[in-house]
């Protein structure tokens, strides 16, 4: 296991990653609130977490990741009531859709995916523990956390508490930045609302307590890594720290990693702004899971990702380029022997790829290492400098990149069909294909490579694969 640098929000610095238990990473991820379909902004954060766990595993760590599903909160209660159904029935559809979306994006499932409503007892026990230590006070049947009792409050988000009125309370789970007030651990039921009868009274949990309770239940009192999107830093993660550390007296999480937002025209993609796409919206427009995953992965997680359809098109061609390269290695025949230069080049690419990821998951740098390699090997092939004996090692290198990228396997069509997005278009006729191939050749001749790429993608979408031959011609075949 080599050195891995991670930017820790808690310390504000890049630090060498270490684990509390040798070789084992215990990681908690705030999952979605299942009140609607997740949007691709949410998936930006989930893809980052997937890259992180895949990279840590490739470095030899055992990863134990816990992800929650928030299946009770203000919005869920309101929406379920409006729909005239129970919260369980209301959230089930979105929980299943979320898990399906994760599979579609090749997100490895967390070792434990846990629902808040299955852990009410654990939350009640944690609230009682806090009450025993006088960190809580009751008010109108609800129970609040007393922030003034926890001097470390603000250490994660660096929020300035001066000017905050002690004892002021906030009723809702999600509130404005810089509004640090005592938050509800337990909420008394309003008439007609879903509630649980418990030793601390009837009611339901506040949003923050679920993550502290479930994280510590499955991962122990101190976690190695806690992740989420930047919007969770305050108040959610600050409150998780306040709850957990007040109860245990131990550090709650050693590394806090936050993904920057996916934005659209300068604004955060979010439900409330109405500027969001779900995966299904994009599939309906004809985009593929692999292109979406690639786009979300390609911008380093600490930078904002500006979402555009053009960017998604580009991501689709990047994925095609990688897949075509692998196809070329598998289908072409090369001269006998083995080249030392190629072996060295592969080694260099593997080192650069790893170095990129080990530098706080710099995917831009890591992915560039792959494309540089693809370019160089293609050139070597064209010059006849690539040998049959180099194929296995080159494919192995691509496979190891692919184990983290997770876009090389050409299974988009099956995934889309499973979700009901199969192509209903009639297959292209040979004449139509020949015409498009000729259009593409013409575009290449006038050096309009963007147009040529577009045609190639258009053909690929209809199941036609092109192979450029060495003499400048093109062969095509149906998938
Ligand atoms: P939520 O369902 O709102 O709790 O969000 C689930 C995850 O998505 C959290 O980690 C959020 O921080 C993250 N998230 C929400 N909006 C965005 C966005 N526009 N870009 C990136 N991550 C986001
Ligand atoms: Zn959380």
Image (tube, helix red, strand yellow):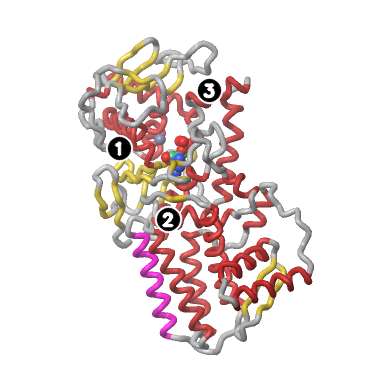
**Residue 305, how many percent across, how many down?**
43, 50
Quarter of the picture holding the N terminus: bottom left
**Residue 252, how many percent across, how many down?**
30, 37
Mark 1 element type? loop
Vertical side of 333 occupied by 423: above or below: above
Q: Which of the two marks, 1 or 2, is nearer to us in this view?
A: 2
Q: Earlier in the sequence, mark 2 or mark 3?
A: 3
List the residue tagged with mark 2. Answer: 299
List the residue tagged with mark 1. Answer: 252
Q: Quadrant of residue 133?
A: top left
Q: Earlier in the sequence, mark 3 or mark 1?
A: 3
Q: Which mark is residue 14?
A: none
Residue placed most toward the observer, 306 or 447: 447
Vertical side of 297 occupied by 41: above or below: above
Characterize the magenta stretch by its predominant secondary structure: helix
Residue 98 falls inside the magenta stretch = no
Q: Quadrant of ligand 1?
A: top left
Q: Residues within 10 Å of mark 2 (few under 14, many from 20)?
A: many
Can residue 209 be spotted in the picture? no
Q: Earlier in the sequence, mark 1 or mark 2?
A: 1
Mark 2 element type? loop
Q: Are marks 2 and 3 in contact (CB under 8 Å)?
A: no
Q: Which residues are magenta?
A: 340-358
List the residue tagged with mark 3. Answer: 77
């Amino acid at each position: 296991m080599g050195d891995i640098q991670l930017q820790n929000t808690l310390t504000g610095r890049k630090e060498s990653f270490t684990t509390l238990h040798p070789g084992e990473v215990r990681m908690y991820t705030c999952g979605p609130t299942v009140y609607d379909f997740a949007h691709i902004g949410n998936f930006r954060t989930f893809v980052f977490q997937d890259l992180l766990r895949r990279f840590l595993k490739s470095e030899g760590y055992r990863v134990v990741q816990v992800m929650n599903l928030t299946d009770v909160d203000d919005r869920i209660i309101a929406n379920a009531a409006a729909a005239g159904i129970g919260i369980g029935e209301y959230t089930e559809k979105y929980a299943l859709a979320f898990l399906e979306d994760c599979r579609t994006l090749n997100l490895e499932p967390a070792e434990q995916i846990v629902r808040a409503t299955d852990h009410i007892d654990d939350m009640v026990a944690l609230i009682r523990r806090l009450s025993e230590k006088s960190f809580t006070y009751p008010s109108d049947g609800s129970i609040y956390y007393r922030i003034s009792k926890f001097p470390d409050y603000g250490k994660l988000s660096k929020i300035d508490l001066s000017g905050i009125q002690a004892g002021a309370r906030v009723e809702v789970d999600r509130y404005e930045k810089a509004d640090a007030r005592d938050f509800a651990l337990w909420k008394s039921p309003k008439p007609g609302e879903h509630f649980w009868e418990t030793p601390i009274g009837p009611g339901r949990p506040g949003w923050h307590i679920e993550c502290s309770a479930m994280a510590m239940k499955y991962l122990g009192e101190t976690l190695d890594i806690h992740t989420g999107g930047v919007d969770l830093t305050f108040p959610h993660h600050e409150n998780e720290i306040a709850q957990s550390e007040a109860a245990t007296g131990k550090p709650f999480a050693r590394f806090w990693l936050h993904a920057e937002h996916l934005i659209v025209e300068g604004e955060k993609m979010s439900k409330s702004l109405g500027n969001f796409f779900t995966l299904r919206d994009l599939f309906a427009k004809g985009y593929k899971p692999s292109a979406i995953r690639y786009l979300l992965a390609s911008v380093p997680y600490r930078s904002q990702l500006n979402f555009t359809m053009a960017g998604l098109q580009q991501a689709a061609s990047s994925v095609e380029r990688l897949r075509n390269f692998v196809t070329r290695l598998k289908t072409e025949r090369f001269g006998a022997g083995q080249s030392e230069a190629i072996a060295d080049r592969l080694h260099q690419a593997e080192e650069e790829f790893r170095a990129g990821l080990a530098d706080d998951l710099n995917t831009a740098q890591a992915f560039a290492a792959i494309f540089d390699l693809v370019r160089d090997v293609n050139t070597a092939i064209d010059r006849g400098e690539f040998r049959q004996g180099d194929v296995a090692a080159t494919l192995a290198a691509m496979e190891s990149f692919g184990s983290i990228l997770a876009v090389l396997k050409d299974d988009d069509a099956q995934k889309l069909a499973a979700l009901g997005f199969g192509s209903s278009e009639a297959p292209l006729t040979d004449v139509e294909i020949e015409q498009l191939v000729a259009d593409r050749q013409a575009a290449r001749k006038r050096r309009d490579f963007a147009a040529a790429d577009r045609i190639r993608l258009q053909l690929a979408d209809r199941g036609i694969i092109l192979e450029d031959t060495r003499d400048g011609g093109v062969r095509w075949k149906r998938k």
